[in-house]
Image (spheres, coloured by chain):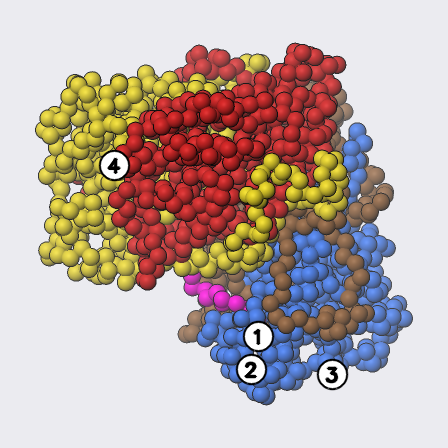
Chain colours: A yellow, B red, C brown, D blue
């Protein structure tokens, strides 16, 4: 394929107008010895039909499970048909960042509405237009806290998603910040005593997640109190964003920043990306938070409209003094989330409740298998940890039946041997669960 | 247009949730009152209202599929539909990132091959696909540079960045704890070699160079530049956002770049989505391979596997493996174009830019009158003098002619900058019509400047009060 | 806007054809010169031109997804997106009509169940899904009636059709060789019973009745009508285009209809596609089952099978089995709404129509002031008198308010007819806003009629010269 | 699901305004005894997620072949990605017939362009906006001929698609026309001598297809001459529309009407529908042909625009005197065809040639199998008939390998025992063909 519309005639007359006889002349500024003499070494071009065939055979080399019990930071939820129909509108997906407000009111208003929904869901006053993903959103919140308070110690709960912690690690290492991890209590929640011990005048932020990586709901209020007592900031994350539909949001409980993964809101699993970094905060941080912000204003005739605002925070104005380097973000994923949340509306609560029902049933059934034990006592949303005689074998059995298995916690928590993190969403039926238990019994 | 919240009515919804099929438990009992939220104030609309709301919003947005979008530095080329269809295949969209490797061989093969293709196209030793966008790639690249010197036990805290550079360059360097020193451009729009000489020393970790730079000009003294940096043990970082200027023509790796980030959503035609998602792979030379983010794909006898076993890695810069679904589109693009296609894409992109440059030269100031690469940068200075018309006015007026305006006021070293990047997918007729519009506006500037200052004249909304937006920020709607 | 032909440039294309992978033969040799065409003059455009052309064309079109579309008799209800996604499943789109039955069990089960659902909803003995649209269903129905009498050895060549009937009714009857006798409506918009009595005799094959009729009124004397027809051995045919008025409320089969055709693209929410494809299933009572088109689905122990073994069948009315992919959408619609949903859809459709009727009654003449069903018909007579404004002017003016106009000048028995069908998927706010617009126009008619006559004021094109179009027909573009 | 936006409040106040206290009152005109007392007997409502699950399981009860050799009136061609993206634009597919030109220029212009492309492809001067399908288009052409000439005999070649003939039969029977079928010659083409014998003053039309059902290309010129010699009209059909890209169109060879199936132009197999009835004719029939016609004209400011024209032919004006009863047609399929033909452009010829290449190779390879023989001598496009020892067994073998088999001609032509009609399009690769032959050898 070749998407250039140039006819031989066009090229000839354009070359004449430009004053070259050979296209090669356009590249004179490139030292001759660096100019390639032969074609690049990549596979031969394909027709459109061949391209589709090629992509098809690649995609078929994957094996899709008929149902999945895997959660651990990415969730298999039903995506209402309207989402795909809207985000495939060419005016949305073939546009760039809305720098020119007059011809970008569509995406600008949609993002403004998204920001509003996220602020409400997280119990904060403001939310930005999106970050890359939940992990980088948390890392930027940590760095922002350190820069804001001019402190260099970051505390993170070990019950936070391991990959999130590793991203926080990378961002903090590069800035020379110290990181301190707080163990989890037998309940599966953060160990409050240990937290108190580690809190000091140099702590910039405390990072937790609720629901946390074990599916457990953290008790945010006391954590916030402790954190604030030494002037640090609380960064509260979450795993499955849908939980916000039924759980009291961290923003209401004292968190300064609420960050997390918004994939659950209308974005497919996509083998890990693109996802949606949610970033919400207290009003007072409005002029310090990273990322694009859409604001409502009026045009010169007084008509309401929307623009990218407070850009003095951003790289293209502030350069090295910017509050972040982010430029392109996840606009289309945020649009999907907005459509998803508008489609669900108050039903998001019902749906979240349904996730809890399925999860409780799965848990109960699994624990009825001899040798299977519950690991943590804290209440859970749609994930929970259990120990069993042989975790590896369990996933093998499930895989044989075309079922996506549970996450093996031992990978990241050596102490949690044969411990599996199960997830049940609205996509899993009672029939499925009974079948699963039958397989494992 | 009304907000979705203003259209909301209690009791409406766009689809019900089915009854639970499992024995139900009492939520308060299993979760505990104190953890439950008391109210959920999301919009309540019927499906028809929802569809009309967003469909009508889409009609207030301008995309490449509607017309010419010469937004400089953003490479708004046409996004082939076949790539969208490929990326929508269930095999690609449906897999969980923690699916066991055996079940994900197709995805891993695609990513592994994508890395190989990028290596051959850019002449690098290895690539990571993990970064989410260009700026994220820059950050990742700078972190690897940091690690490189940490490993060598050298303390280098400075990064040299030309004054013409994109804002993300200094911002990314700063975000990982470097200090920035600004490098001057010379009279012909390239690096001021003497200034570079005077700035380069053992405290400098790297020079962050965009080549071709944001003026659309290729650095003629690139050999010299590379020598100066490397002689002092520094590294040469390339911002590859402008890669559409040289695919199949030259390779950064051959020229001496040690690290380069790409923007798949520019050079490799993945749609920009109204602001994202993009994808910012980073390529490195041999010396930096060990520092790439984990996990990395390794090929074993049992097929592809994810491995974290790279002790010197900087770690992760995001969860999972990157913007996989975006990468699928770029992969399909590379496969369908092949070497011939990529080269001719670059050739036509550069021809188009030079054609516009030549056609508009008589009417607008061209600060650097040289052969340009994929884009050209004019200055609106003359129009300010002739009619008090500013570049922003010209941009708004272009909207009336049915075009998305070029990038304006960037690069900052050009006053009243108009940065025009046509890309290769635009035909001569399109370029001619656009140039006619620009020339008309230049005329209007002399004869009827007010008309230009009043633009746009037929959009849903006219010029926005941005000062009000910043003074009285309203970023979330509140129920009156 | 330019035509795709005017955008064409020699040498351009939107995608190449790959080389043949088989040993090639000389086409002239295997086909023979005389059979080969000499030139092929199709547009030559790049993919980007193609996409922009049709995308911009789409933006010059109005659909239900943009706003209110009260086109009477067309039931322009919202088309749920989930049905589109269901119909796009490869399992449904990819199968060849001659795939062996065993491979098509899913499709056949869907069609068989669809027929059963329609039987329960309409109270008929059997359904065929073969007809492509409503008019095609009418034709199929009339052919079955013809066969029925042929079988009985009766020569009946007349069909009674009310003056208010849709044009397809007489046209369909005529297309299969019947003669049409027009039946008068009475003062309350129903069948004139005396006239019916006087017309009914042994030459009459059937009465073709739309109920509710095109005035949106239910035939109060339906029992009487049915008795009169059947007493003389005639059949009662129902045009089911208005079925949205009675789903779950009453069943034509119970009332005495022997044949009825439906419009899935109206009542069952399949999108109308800018003119089609639709789908026009036909249901029959016991007496006519043998005459249904072939092939028909039969259920055997080995599953579903297609059978042509129905000697009395009228044969085929089109190739294969009908608009399968449209039927998939209607099936999904019925399954998702269930009995409750269908009934409440009808109830809200009728409530909406009566609401509009009551709100507009003071401002426009309502020739038949009764409770209406799914639609109501006004007359613009008053506006002609008050401002020389005709119904067509009112229609055009509504466009300026962002609405698709109602059906106009139909039914023909109402002068200056304005036929408004809101459907059940429209909210009270939408109806209120529409009524406000109508009332404003009624005002303008008195105060500023010219404004109404000049409408539409802000569309791509203004009123068309239809006379020119008919006098100098130009239905195919010719290269100048 | 339920798509009515009415809130309880809305219903209450609307009932009040309408003056009823109970919705039931709105149905008073329906005799009480006919009003249903209980709910309809159909399955219970489903949520959107359940609906998708239900449809999914139905669609999976079908078995899609990995490749197909079935043609016989429906063809498996590659559909360029652009087609789906355009026809899924909501402004197109949720619109009704363009009665209101000012807000329907999009579909009107697209159909005008389609008519132009079809007229050119068929070698005629005019084409309508579409008919239901190829078969009904042919039947209407026959009836139209009879009514136009006031004659009552229709001649149809037996080499015309059996289902098309059966539809023609139904339409003609209902009008009391006589039908006469002309056998095929050994060449696979119509038997010209027999045609001459049957032609007389009462013949209204001669119906042929080229390529015909056997894939053979008919020699149209002499057929046209013979037909016209007795004042009858020639209705020339075709099987795979793509053949028009390379074959001399019947319109150029004297056909009065060219009708056929346009499914090949960007419309999926869809188990037989919706498809696209192509109807083209000589200029002189402009005011008599069935179906919608889009015409170019100018608006009151002289700007070019498009409208539905010559509606006096149509049912809504002419009622029983209309030239046809057609109202809704196949607009969206015609749009798809227009996009398809614009996307292919001159490449349609290359693509048709590719079909011939693949077909010739498949034929050659199959005939190399012992016991397989060619049936007809006439040149073919992308279908051909062969005899083999056991036709049923061949298709069984192919099916086992997941291959869609050949059409068994014996079904409709008892004399053609063990005769298979094979079709090869651009979707079949050499590798596939070699594999197939290996399976059958
Ligand atoms: C030269 C240059 N570098 C870097 C970037 C940042 O890329 P992204 O927006 O993908 O983060 C851009 C984007 O505008 C750019 O133009
Ligand atoms: C009352 C009535 N009957 C029949 C028809 C014909 O239906 P179709 O357009 O599907 O052929 C219509 C369509 O407008 C109609 O309104």
- The answer to whether residue D47 is seen in the rendering is no
Residue drawn at x 18%, y 36% as measured from the top left: A158
Mark 2–mark 4 Cα distance, whole angstroms, equals 66 Å
Circles 2 and 4, Cβ within 8 Å, touching? The answer is no
- Name the front one of labels 4 and 3: 4
Q: Is residue A299 left or right of residue A17?
A: left
Mark 1–mark 2 Cα distance, whole angstroms, equals 9 Å
Mark 2–mark 3 Cα distance, whole angstroms, equals 20 Å
Q: Name the residue under label 4.
A: A165
Q: Who comes first in sequence, dot 1 or dot 3?
A: 3
Which chain contains the residue that carries disc 1?
D
Mark 2 is surrounded, within 10 Å at the Cα level, by few (under 14), some (14 to 19) or many (20 or more) other residues, namely: many
Which chain contains the residue that carries disc 3?
D
Residue drawn at x 82%, y 47% as measured from the top left: C479
Q: Is mark 2 within 8 Å of ligand 2?
A: no
Residue D67 on the magenta segment:
yes
The magenta-colored residue range is D57-69
Give a yes or no on whether discs 2 and 3 share a subunit: yes
Q: How many labels does the image show?
A: 4
Which of the labelled discs sits on residue D391, or is there none?
Answer: 2
């Amino acid at each position: 394929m070749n998407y250039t519309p140039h006819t031989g005639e066009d090229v000839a007359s354009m070359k004449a107008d430009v004053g070259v006889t050979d296209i090669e002349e356009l590249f004179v500024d490139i030292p001759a010895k660096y100019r390639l003499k032969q074609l690049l070494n990549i596979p031969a071009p394909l027709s459109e039909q061949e391209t589709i065939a090629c992509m098809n055979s690649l995609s078929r080399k994957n094996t899709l499970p008929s149902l999945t019990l895997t959660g651990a930071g990415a969730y298999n939820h039903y995506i209402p048909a309207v989402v795909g129909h809207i985000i495939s509108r060419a005016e949305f997906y073939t546009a760039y960042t809305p720098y020119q407000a007059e011809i970008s009111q569509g995406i600008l208003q949609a993002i403004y509405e998204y920001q509003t929904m996220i602020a409400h869901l997280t119990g904060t006053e403001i939310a930005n237009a999106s970050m890359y993903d939940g992990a980088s959103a948390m890392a930027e919140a940590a760095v922002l806290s350190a820069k804001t308070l001019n402190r260099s110690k970051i505390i993170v709960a070990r019950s936070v998603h391991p990959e999130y912690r590793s991203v926080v690690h990378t961002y903090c290492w590069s800035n020379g910040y110290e990181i301190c991890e707080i163990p989890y209590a037998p309940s599966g929640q953060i160990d409050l005593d240990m937290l108190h011990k580690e809190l000091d005048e140099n702590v910039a932020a405390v990072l937790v997640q609720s629901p946390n990586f074990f599916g457990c709901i953290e008790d945010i209020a006391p954590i916030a109190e402790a954190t604030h007592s030494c002037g640090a900031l609380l960064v509260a994350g979450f795993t499955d964003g849908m939980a916000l539909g039924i759980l009291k949001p961290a923003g209401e409980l004292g968190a300064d920043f609420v960050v997390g993964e918004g994939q659950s809101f209308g974005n497919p699993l996509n083998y890990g990306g693109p996802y949606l970094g949610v970033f919400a905060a207290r009003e007072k941080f409005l002029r310090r938070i990273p990322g694009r912000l859409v604001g409502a204003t009026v045009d010169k005739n007084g008509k309401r409209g929307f623009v990218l605002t407070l850009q003095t925070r951003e790289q293209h104005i502030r350069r090295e003094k910017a509050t972040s380097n982010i430029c392109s973000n996840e606009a289309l994923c945020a649009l999907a989330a907005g459509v998803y949340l508008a489609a669900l509306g108050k039903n998001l609560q019902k749906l979240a409740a349904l996730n809890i029902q399925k999860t409780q049933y799965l848990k109960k059934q699994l624990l009825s298998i001899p040798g299977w034990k519950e690991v943590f006592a804290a209440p859970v949303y749609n994930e929970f940890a259990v120990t069993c005689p042989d975790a590896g074998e369990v996933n093998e059995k499930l895989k044989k039946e075309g079922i996506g298995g549970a996450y093996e916690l031992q990978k990241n928590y050596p102490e949690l041997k044969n411990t599996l993190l199960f997830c049940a969403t609205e996509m899993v039926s009672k029939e499925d669960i009974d079948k699963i238990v039958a397989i494992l019994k | 247009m009304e907000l979705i919240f203003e259209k909301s009515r209690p009791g409406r919804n766009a689809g019900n949730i089915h009854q639970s099929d499992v024995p139900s438990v009492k939520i308060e009992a299993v979760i505990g009152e104190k953890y439950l939220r008391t109210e959920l104030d999301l919009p309540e609309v019927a499906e028809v209202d929802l569809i009309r709301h967003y469909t009508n919003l889409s009609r207030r947005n301008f995309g490449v599929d509607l017309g010419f979008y010469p937004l400089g530095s953003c490479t708004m080329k046409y996004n082939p539909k076949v790539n969208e269809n490929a990326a929508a295949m269930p095999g690609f969209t449906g897999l969980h990132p923690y699916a066991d490797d055996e079940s994900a061989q197709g995805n891993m093969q695609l990513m592994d091959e994508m890395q190989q293709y990028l290596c051959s196209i850019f002449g690098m030793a290895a690539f990571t696909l993990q970064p989410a966008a260009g700026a994220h790639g820059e950050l990742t690249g700078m972190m690897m540079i940091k690690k490189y010197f940490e490993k060598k036990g050298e303390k280098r805290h400075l990064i040299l960045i030309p004054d013409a550079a994109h804002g993300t360059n200094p911002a990314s360097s700063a975000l990982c704890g470097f200090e920035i020193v600004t490098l001057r451009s010379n009279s012909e729009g390239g690096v001021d070699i003497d200034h570079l000489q005077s700035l380069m020393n053992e405290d400098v970790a790297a020079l962050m160079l965009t080549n071709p730079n944001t003026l659309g000009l290729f650095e003629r003294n690139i050999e010299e530049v590379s020598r100066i940096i490397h002689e002092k043990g520094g590294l040469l970082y390339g911002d590859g956002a402008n890669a559409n200027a040289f695919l199949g023509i030259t390779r950064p790796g051959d020229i001496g770049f040690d690290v380069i980030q790409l923007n798949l959503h520019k050079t490799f035609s993945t749609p920009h989505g109204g602001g994202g998602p993009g994808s910012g792979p980073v390529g490195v030379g041999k010396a930096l391979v060990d520092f790439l983010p984990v996990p990395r794909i390794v090929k074993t006898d049992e097929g592809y596997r994810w491995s974290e076993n790279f002790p010197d890695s900087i770690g992760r810069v995001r969860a999972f493996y990157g913007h996989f679904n975006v990468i699928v589109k770029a992969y399909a693009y590379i496969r369908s174009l092949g070497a011939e296609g990529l080269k001719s894409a670059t050739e036509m992109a550069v021809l188009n830019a030079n054609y516009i440059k030549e056609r508009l030269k008589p009417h607008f100031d061209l600060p650097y009158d040289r052969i340009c690469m994929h884009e050209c940068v004019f200055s609106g200075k003359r129009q300010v003098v002739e009619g008090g018309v500013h570049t922003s006015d010209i941009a708004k007026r272009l909207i009336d002619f049915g075009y998305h305006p070029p990038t304006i006021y960037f690069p900052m070293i050009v006053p009243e900058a108009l940065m025009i990047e046509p890309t290769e997918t635009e035909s001569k007729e399109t370029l001619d019509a656009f140039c006619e519009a620009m020339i008309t506006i230049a005329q209007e500037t002399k004869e009827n400047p007010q008309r230009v200052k009043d633009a746009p004249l037929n959009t849903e909304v006219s010029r926005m009060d941005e000062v009000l937006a910043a003074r009285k920020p309203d970023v979330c709607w509140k129920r009156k």
